[in-house]
Image (cartoon, grey):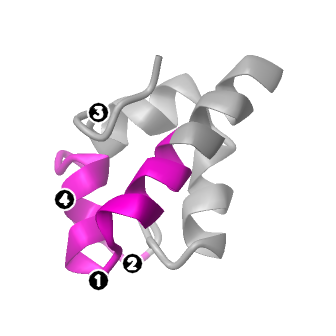
Amino acid sequence: MITGNITIEELVERIPDSVSYLMENGIRCIVCGEPIWDTLENAAREKGFSEVQIDRIVEELNQLEIRA
C-alpha cells in the first residue's frame, strides 16, 4: 500500500508509471533533478498541495499500483 511517507525513489521502483502520473499532476520527479529520496508527501507539499489533494494522489497511486 502506498502512503504519503513513501520515497519518490521507492514509488518509482514499485510503479514505474508513477513518473508520468506525478508529472501530469504537477509533481516533477527524476526529469528535473529534484531529490528522489524525499517523500511523496513532502514533494507534494513543496508544490503547494493541500492535505486533501495529497490524500487524493495517494489514493490514485494505490489504484495505479493495483492495475500494474
The residue positioned 23% from the left and 70% from the top of the image is 45
Q: Which comes before the other along the chain, label 2 or label 1?
A: 2
Whichever of labels 2 and 3 marks the residue nearer the N terminus, that label is 3
Residue under numbered circle 2? 32
Secondary structure beneath disc 4? Answer: helix
The residue carrying mark 4 is 42
- Which of pointers 4 and 1 lies earlier in the amino acid sequence? 4
Q: Which residues, given as a range, are shown in magenta?
A: 32-58
Q: Nearer the viewer, residue 33 or 2?
A: 2
Q: Is residue 56 above or below residue 6?
A: below
Q: CA distance from mark 2 to mark 1?
A: 17 Å
Q: Which residue is identified by label 3?
A: 6
Classify 10 Å Cα crowding around label 4: few (below 14), some (14-19), many (20 and above).
some
Few, some or many residues within 10 Å of mark 2 (<14, 14–19, 20+): few
Q: Which mark is residue 48?
A: 1
Q: Report x, y in % for residue 47.
A: 30, 81
Asked if the residue under mark 2 is in contact with the one under mark 4, i.e. CB atoms within 8 Å, the reply is: no
Q: CA distance from mark 2 to mark 3?
A: 19 Å
Q: Residues within 10 Å of mark 1 (few under 14, many from 20)?
A: few
Which of the two discs, 4 and 3, labels the residue nearer the N terminus?
Answer: 3
